[in-house]
Amino acid sequence: MPLFHVTGANWNTGDLIQPGSWGQTLRQFRPGGPVPGSWETVMWEVALETARRQVAPVAPSRFNCVFVCESEAFAIAFRDQYRPTAHLVQVEPTDGDQTIHRGDFMLLSGNIPGQPAYVDYMTERGIAYWTSNPAPGMGEILFDGPVRVV
């Protein structure tokens, strides 16, 4: 199954993409520091990390992983909606011993019926992200180690 990474960097065949870039981005937001463009993103990530620690503690943290899409169609849809200036690279795991998690990104990005308050749905959807199975081809795979550009 081909895997795809959405990126703004210029990677070459054979390059290793290391985990942790998203975590570095999130960790710059702190009291007295820069303000994020979207507080909703920061709230999601805090809810997801808290849920992971409770229900899936051996799963890779979103703060220290490489995000990979399990289909080109999903990668294109993600890029077009969230990173329109980025491009796709096909990747493969560097070894078979990496811990992975297959999360349902649609739980985080889909329309929330009735538009409830963030505090009323982020915890439940955060838990579901770590405990449910996404539709085929729509999984967001988290690798706890590097992936190689192919």
Image: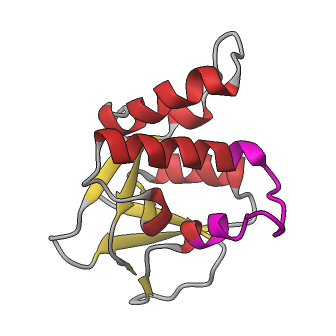
Residue 138 appears in the picture as rendered: no
* Residue 40 spot, x, y in % from top left: 72, 42
Residue at the image position 60 percent from the left and 28 percent from the top: 110
Q: Which residues are magenta?
A: 24-41
Residue 1 at x, y = what percent? 27, 57
Q: Is residue 35 magenta?
A: yes
Q: Quadrant of the C terminus?
A: bottom left
Would residue 121 be visible to someone looking at this image?
Answer: yes
Q: Residue at x 70, y 71 (%)?
A: 28
Magenta run includes residue 133: no
Give the residue displayed 57% in from the left and 30% down from the top.
Answer: 122
**Which residue is more in the foreground, 89 or 131?**
131
Dominant SS in magenta: loop
Q: Position of residue 73 (x, y in %)?
A: 50, 47
Taking the image as shown, residue 95 lies to the left or right of residue 30, namely left
Q: Give the quarter of the image for residue 6.
A: bottom right
Residue drawn at point x = 55 percent, y = 73 percent = 21
Q: Is residue 81 above or below residue 128?
A: below
Write down the quadrant of residue 133 in the picture: top left
In front here: 134 or 144?
A: 144
Indicate whether 105 appears above or below 10. Answer: above
